[in-house]
């Protein structure tokens, strides 16, 4: 199950999950002895999804939800850290699509990718 703004979308065929620490200005290495001080003020997820072999209609629907209706979305996705589904506020990063036109006039979208960065 994969939803954008509460609307079920085609399930991605792949996902790269990343958790980033956001550190305060007080974090860093000491110039005296090289020791590290890290003050984590938040952790944020970045999800990079890929879809393969979508119909033209499916890819268009995805592109419209990810980029054409604004860059901020509510995303429902399987989260590896929580062990279940989560819904959170994300903004969308760059989106790309590879597509082909076949000799019989059909159109297939072979690869679509988009990143979602937690707000």
Image (cartoon, helix red, strand yellow):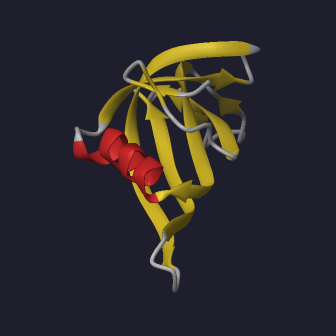
Depth check: give the residue in front, 44 or 111. Answer: 111
34 with respect to 24 (left or right):
right
Residue extending furthest toward the front = 104
Classify the position of the N terminus by image quarter.
top right
In the drawing, does residue 60 fall left or right of residue 51? Answer: left
Say which residue appears at 59% left-offset and 45% top-offset.
49
> As displayed, is residue 115 above or below residue 1?
below
| Quadrant placement of the C terminus | top left
Q: Nearer the viewer, residue 6 or 16?
A: 6
Task: Please say if 13 is above or below 56.
Answer: above
Q: Name the quadrant containing residue 92.
A: top left
Q: Percent from the top left, x then y, of residue 8? A: 49, 26
Residue 6 falls in image quadrant: top left
Q: Residue at x 57, y 21 (%)?
A: 39
In percent of the image, x 46 and y 36: which residue is there? 117
Find residue 20 and report its horizontal and vertical position in percent: 59, 34
Given residues 24 and 48, the one toward you in this image is 48
Q: Residue 24: image x %, image y %? A: 47, 26
- Between 5 and 39, the one lying in front of the other is 5
**Picture quadrant of residue 37:** top right
Q: Is residue 7 left or right of residue 2?
A: left
x, y percent for residue 56 = 44, 58
Compared to residue 108, the image places residue 88 above or below, namely above
């Amino acid at each position: 199950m994969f939803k954008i703004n509460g609307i079920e979308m085609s399930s991605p065929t792949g996902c790269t999950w990343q958790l980033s620490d956001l550190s305060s200005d007080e974090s860093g290495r000491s110039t005296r002895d090289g020791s590290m001080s890290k003050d984590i003020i938040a952790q944020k997820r970045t999800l990079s999804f890929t879809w393969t072999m979508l119909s033209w209609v499916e890819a268009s629907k995805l592109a419209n939800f990810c980029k054409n209706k604004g860059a901020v979305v509510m995303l429902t996705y399987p989260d590896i850290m929580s062990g279940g589904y989560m819904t959170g506020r994300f903004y969308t990063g760059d989106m790309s699509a590879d597509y082909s036109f076949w000799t019989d006039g059909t159109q297939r979208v072979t690869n679509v990718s988009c990143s979602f960065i937690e707000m």
